Image: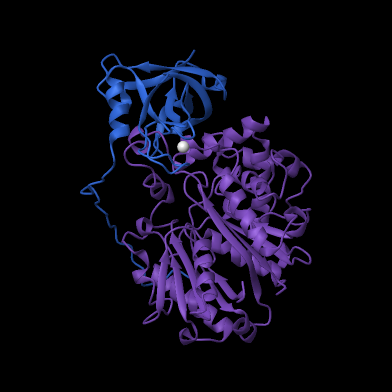
Chain colours: A purple, B blue
Amino acid sequence: MERKVAIVSHVQTKHSSDIGMPRERMLFNLVKELHNKVGITRHDVDSYVLCSNDFEAGRTISTVFEDTPVGAYMKDETKVEMDGIMALIYATMRILSGQFDTALVVANSLGGSQFRPFLIMEYQLDPTFDRQVGLINELNAGAFQARSYMDKYGLDEWFLDAISARLLRNGAINPYALRSKDDATPEYVASSEYYYEPLRKLHCYPFSDGACAVLLACGEKAKELCEKPVWIKGFSNSLETCRLGERELYTSPSTKQAAEKAYKAAGISDPANEIDVAEISAKFAHQEPIICESLGLFPEGSAEDVAKNDLAEITGKMPISPSGGGICTYVFSAAGLINVAQCCQQLTGEAGDAQVPNAKIALAHGQDGFCAQHNSVVILSSEEG
Amino acid sequence: MAFQMGEETRTFPITWDVSANKYKIESRGLRILTEGMKDKKIRGIRCHECDTVYIPGPFYCRKCHIEIDEVVEVKDTGTVMSFAVDMADIRGNPLPEKRISAMIKLDDCDAWFIGTVENMDWKDAKVGMRVKSIWVDEPQGKFSDIDHFEPI
Ligand SMILES: [Zn+2]
């Protein structure tokens, strides 16, 4: 990478089950807030990469009504349909190409109030087989995945309760989180109803309205625009087959592969010791250990040990999702980008009560598809290096 | 940020009718599977490069990225690889009774089949348990010809 790319600024909504306004208003307000924060207008942005979902928006090329609210009138604009972290990767590449000096990435969903994400997921299934069989939805597929991990490592449900409890407590110190409980315990989580056993309500993501915008710039421009740029040191993504029945669900080989490439680019050889904080897109409690283990942050099958020894707490050896992660908020299309924004807060020392002391290197993860079929990894640093 | 309920926010119920979608597939693997089911046989396609057996058989191996066409019969018995205890159907409507939905690795096959496991208490379900297909009396060449699975 000759050219360097950094994050200048980021904003996100107070996520909600019903944000109470149309998408256009939500995005307009959000981008205006970012403009004011940085001290720019839309004329200072060269390129736009947007991310939202056609099904959820109820119209094809969902971003056509989002372009002008974010200021992209008569600008270079493109769209990503997967997770917002892919939009960030795409925007990074556009700047690396030398064609653009700045790029605004915006991802959003009204999955809380407009259209249920479970339905979107149902329509991701192969219409000729999986959908015809009529037995799979995102929740029981999640339950298959949880059971697969539990069986592989001989664990009972306690670790699921412990993970959700930790995340709900973290959510209580994240002003943007939708769901939280400052005194959540594993027993509290275990008292929530079963959806598809072994998954209970509080092991699953809440339907969320929300949006996130991240402004990227090439190195020189980023230093002009802000005092503390957050540097993008490495990124990658990888995917597995679309058929659940052809995958080992207790592990995430695509996460592993994406991580290896991102680590190589970032010069990381010992991720568990070099990474100070990670924000993980886990839509269900069990996905957090599966993804973290494939990232090399914890040993395989260690979910129970990690929880018992508080290793993933904000004060722990390897803090995972100080934001509260997917159990507190999962904005479809925006979740991975929100993770990037949360990592930036950590690296610029603006994470408030959730601050991991001296965080210098952060990992943001994003996913898409049934049981995290597609995984993306971005390595961020407070140091240009 | 001033994120308050906008006075001028209105909600319009809209529908999105995609029933006219003419979805095209290369149907050989599905045809081989469903035709076999009329005779209570389950057939997939094997990759001649890596030996992976798929059901329904695709026209290419997803891993080797080559065309494949070797038809193989797989058994209608198998092993439960994972399962969920469903309290609701796929649209979230409560079920009258709890139901075990399972991913089943049929013998001689690498792809897992999804089905329900009946005739057992859900509390006794285990990963690794052996199951057999229970066919309908008069198979029609449909996925529903396997009515459910039962423990062996
Ligand atoms: Zn092959």
Q: Is residue B137 visible?
A: yes
Residue A282 location (% of width, % of height) = 58, 50
Q: Is residue B140 above or below residue A306?
A: above
Relative to residue A271, is residue A115 drawn left or right? left
Image quadrant holding the N terminus of chain B, namely bottom right
- Residue drawn at (30%, 22%) of the image: B36
Can I make out residue B2 in this image?
A: no
Which of the 4 image quadrants contains residue A151? Answer: top right
Q: Is residue B35 left or right of residue A144?
A: left
In this rendered view, identify the residue nearer to me: A129 or A330. A129
Quarter of the figure with residue A307: top right
Q: Position of residue A172 (x, y in %)?
A: 65, 58
**Residue farthest toward the left in the current orientation of the protein:** B20
Q: Is residue A327 above or below residue A33?
A: above
In this view, the residue in front, B33 or A36, is: B33
Q: Is residue A220 above or below residue A147?
A: below
Position above or below: B3 against A314: below
Front residue of A278/B13: it is: A278
Residue A152 image position (x, y, % from top left): 64, 31
